[in-house]
Image (cartoon, grey):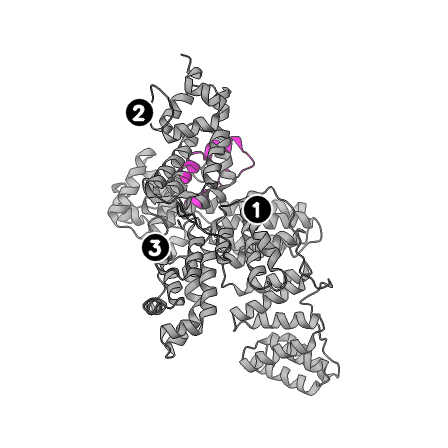
Amino acid sequence: MPPDRHPWLVRFEHAPEEALGDLLAGYADIHPYERADAPDAARMLFGPLDPDNPARSLLGPALLSWLEKRRKDPLPAARPKLQRRIREIDEAFEIVALLEVADAAIALRRRLHVWTDWTARLVLSPARDGRAALWRTLALTQPLVAAHAPDLDADGLAPLWQQICREAGARVPQHYLSIGLLGLRRLPRGNAGSELPWVAGLAQWALARNPSDAEFEAEWLGLKPLYPRAPERWRKLVSTLLSTREFRDHEIEPPGWWRVDPDFKSLVQKRYVASGVPLRSPMPEDCSRVIDRLDEPFEKIEPLIDDLFRRHRHYLHATGHSHYFVRAVHMLGSELIGRGEDARDARAEKAQALAREGLTWEPYNRHLWALWRDALVAGGTPEAAELIGWEMIRRDPGNMNARNQLATLLVNELGRLDDAEALLGDTIETFPDDDVARNELAELLIFEDRIDEATTIVDTAFDDGIISEATFSLRARLLSHAGRHDDALRVLEEGLALDPMSSSLERQKLSLIKGASISLKSGAFRTLAPRGSERSLPAPTFDPELTGVMRLGSVRRLRFSLEVASAQQPASALDELRQILSEDPTFAYAELLAARHRLWEADASTLPPFAAAFEAALAAEDRVTLEALATRQPKLEALMLVAKALIGDAAAAEEVAQWLRRSEPALEEPAIAGLRNALGSVLRLIDGGHSPQDAFSEMRERALRAVRDANEAALGDMFLAA
């Protein structure tokens, strides 16, 4: 029969998604291909078809629709059913790559954060690993996506592949190294030779993992034959790569790990000198020269900015070293939104794009998150900037500056003084030693003419010894406002004794000496908006990455409404949470919050998301479930230990105390590292003579907040499978 008239294809044309589901499940009548697995059967059925064949054109939409429904379906709890579900999903991804289904590949790439977040729950074993299948498909289809979606950065996944190489054998299994190297090998555009990116990825893995000679030899010699090159070319490439600063700083000299290859014998014996231009990143002064011209018209400086970062990217993609690129993004981006009167929107958009590109390389960089937030404000979208600010707090709960800066944004840009006051109060409660939050709250109260309350906060700060230059300034201004000029002068002299170089305190002192009073209100807050807690909704965006981040930020803001501002809007916040879950029942962060507020309950026949299951077990004081979750996610075992200590488990409290005293392991998850830092006050009590159980009892509320923060911070981390 003609290849396009196979009976199964006829059925597929009439009911694409149903027929595809049967094929993936193994139920389809595909004689004579019954013994083939689904991807091979699909290749034999669809492979001979012309690109414009109706069945072939339906394949992409059918795959995407089937995957989207699987994403929203609860996962079965029974392991055989779960294994079968993951196999079907793996094979759906494989079909996308095998048959080069362009529309499906582009859709997966555009919503990478959504698919990666979901497939992180589909990691059972090397043979049943939905995340690995997705990443492998993305790696293989990079040239296809570049050819059909020119708006997507052709090398945009390079940071992911380099990060996978660095984390292989640590936060992700060792066999993921092959995925990272595959991704670098399949980049549509090579830098300084097509083999350099993947050789750099191999070097990044070796630098992070310090493999044995046998381990490195197995990886290197497994790929080298795929690239027939003269030994001289390999020697030059490796020598150039290992001569860059990062490897030199780690005392890695050419040939480094390549000493296992006889082709590098001359490098081992120091008889080889590489010729050509060395790999160098632009210098800080190159960035400074561009910054010096930022007051010029934007159309004149934009080409200079583009050229600077073109050179940075050449070095970045060739070596995988992100430090210099990220430093330049922060330096120039911050100046870009603060200088120049023309083309403010264009300047802000440029700063946003640079910040986001930097975050693909360093997703936990606080400076880049702040730059993205501030660039959104400069671009006239403070509502989106607010949600970025909340997301900063979620992923980095120990970042006090992010909280204080968000409070300033709430006042200055959105006029939400009540929310700002509540946030600053919550920050002081969470971080009692944070003098910045105390001073910001006092400034806000002064701004609202609540002088007595501001005076109480400043006096308390002095009593507690939590003082800084700004605290001395605040007290002097309040005393001057009360007509106590001599006392104000004395306070300023005390401040200058501690910080003789303080120009602001010196200016205030001179004003008092001249008989003038000090201005009470500072420029910290400038909005004259009325008090209120009405929230502005951000404008719709068609940017999947920004939408994903704002989505997480909106739920973190919802947590704030429920736990801190609950006296004002508990019912509306709960209604908003229910609405989010009705629109996306498997949104993990919303499920977590629903479990915390007893709005969510797992079905016994389904595998619950880890974060929500943890919250439910903590609320129910369910030790058995907590222990099962520790087995399910061993990288977060400390989270379960602290939870058991909080519900009165003395043995767990002792284990937590021992864990806190140990030096921080190099491979600790970021969320667990944050939990360790947040429990410092508990450890101080223990070291002061309290039993671990008594310490947790006394510091229960603070420890409970730390556990919840850590659980939320672990969400959406693409390298943490759950």
Q: Amino acid at mark 3?
A: Ala
Q: Give, as a single range, the part of the protein colored magenta.
A: 134-161
Spatial distance from mark 1 to mark 3, Cα to Cα? 34 Å
Q: Main secondary structure of the magenta part?
A: helix
Snapshot quadrant of residue 187: top left
Q: Residue furthest top?
A: 1
Q: Nearer the viewer, residue 200 or 158?
A: 158
Q: Residues within 10 Å of mark 3 (few under 14, many from 20)?
A: few
Classify mark 2: helix, strand or loop: loop
How many discs appear? Answer: 3
Task: Using the image, tell me which numbered label, if any, was put on residue 35.
Answer: 2
Work out whether residue 242 can be spotted: no
Judged by depth in the image, the label closer to the viewer, 2 or 1, is 2
Pinpoint residue 82: horizontal percent, then vertical percent: 36, 41
Q: Nearer the viewer, mark 2 or mark 3?
A: 3
How far is mark 2 from mark 3, CA to CA? 38 Å
* Residue shown at the point (55%, 43%) measured from the top left: 544
Q: Quadrant of the N terminus?
A: top left
Disc sitting over residue 79 in the figure: none
Badge 3 is on which residue? Answer: 628
Say which residue label 1 marks: 547
Residue at image location 45% in from the left, 70% down from the top? 700
